[in-house]
Image (tube, grey):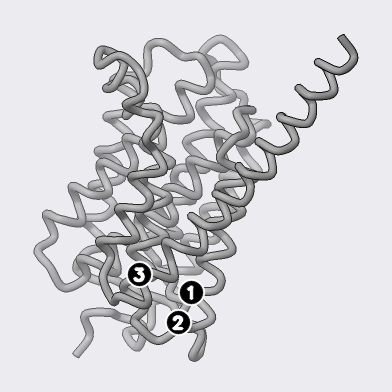
Amino acid sequence: MADYVLIRKSRNVISSILHVILNILLGVGSIAITVITGSWILGLILVLISKWRIFAVRPRYWWLNIMSSLVDLIVGASFVLIAFCSGRSWLIVHTILAMAYTLWLIFLKPRSSELAAEMQSLIAVFLGTTAVTMLFASSDSIFMVISCFFIGFAASRHLLVQADDNEFGLLTYSCGLVAAEIAWMCNSWLIVYTFGNTGIIVPQLSVILTIFAFISGRVYRSSIKHDGKIQLSEITTPLIFSILVVVMLVIWFSNPIFDVIDG
């Protein structure tokens, strides 16, 4: 019996080590191959292959697995697309992306607590809208609007499912619509913040939508905690802070020099 337990523990340790190694290879490899080839296709294929478990069950569960994996797919695809849009020369941003994706895969993605779900959703919103802005800044606004709707829908659904809320259909679509409307309003004046020669780009739209997602989550959490009643004392501080950040961005950090469509 003792030998069996020892063998079992050894297998668990080996499995854990292999799991970490594979995640490191995925995190670094997807970014590296995107930069080397100058194409997002192979990097995105690696991300999709990593989700093979979605289809390792009976077909009737495929759709449920796809929906539950949307946030992880958005994050993975966003890392690859941001790396692609950052160019074929290896920059500091590529190193940051490879490290961040690896940390996501190893430490944050496997967690299922309420706080982890909130962080996962916010990261998906920020990275997803960053990738969308970089891809569609000069395209028709419909692409950005639809993409932001999908990101807002997926992020809110992820948070509500983790909270065991079975009546989240209308709320998730509402969050998607609000995200799409904000994207539509910001589309004609897309501001991005750059940081020297690092290649790091932070769109103003991403900051605003992430703040919106953060506040929405706090309001929802308060309403659930108090049977549908929102306690102002629980949301006043984060609400005031978020409003101040957005006002500062719009008034003092919207100089046309950052406008991605400025000629």
The amino acid pointed to by label 1 is His
Numbered badge on residue 199:
2
The amino acid type found where label 2 is placed reads Gly
Judge from the rendering whether residue 110 lies leftward or rightward of residue 16; answer left or right: left
Tell me the amino acid under the disc marked 3: Thr
* Mark sitting on residue 94: 1
C-alpha distance separating marks 1 and 3: 10 Å
Q: Position of residue 8 (x, y in %)?
A: 76, 22
Residue 190: image x %, image y %? 28, 71
Q: From the top left corner, tell me how far across and down residue 117 is, in percent.
A: 55, 33
Earlier-in-chain disc, 1 versus 3: 3
Q: Secondary structure at mark 1?
A: helix
**Foreground: 57 or 107?**
57
In terms of secondary structure, where does tag 3 sit? helix
Looking at the picture, how far across and down is residue 214, in whole percent?
Answer: 52, 43
Instruction: Locate the N terminus by quadrant.
Output: top right
Report which residue position mark 3 lands on. Answer: 34
User: Within the image, what quadrant is residue 178 found in?
Assistant: top left
**Crowding near the residue tagged with mark 2, few <14, some 14–19, many ≥20 C-alpha atoms within 10 Å:** some
What's the residue at 38%, 69% (across, down)? 33
**Tag 2 secondary structure:** loop
Quarter of the image with the C terminus is bottom left
16 or 209: nearer the viewer:
16
Q: Residue visible at 29% across and 61% down? A: 42
Marks 1,2: beta carbons within 8 A: yes
Which of disc 3 and disc 2 is earlier in sequence? Answer: 3
Residue at 36 percent across and 77 percent down: it is 36
- Residue at the spot x=26%, y=12% of the render? 60
| Near-viewer residue (249 or 203) | 203
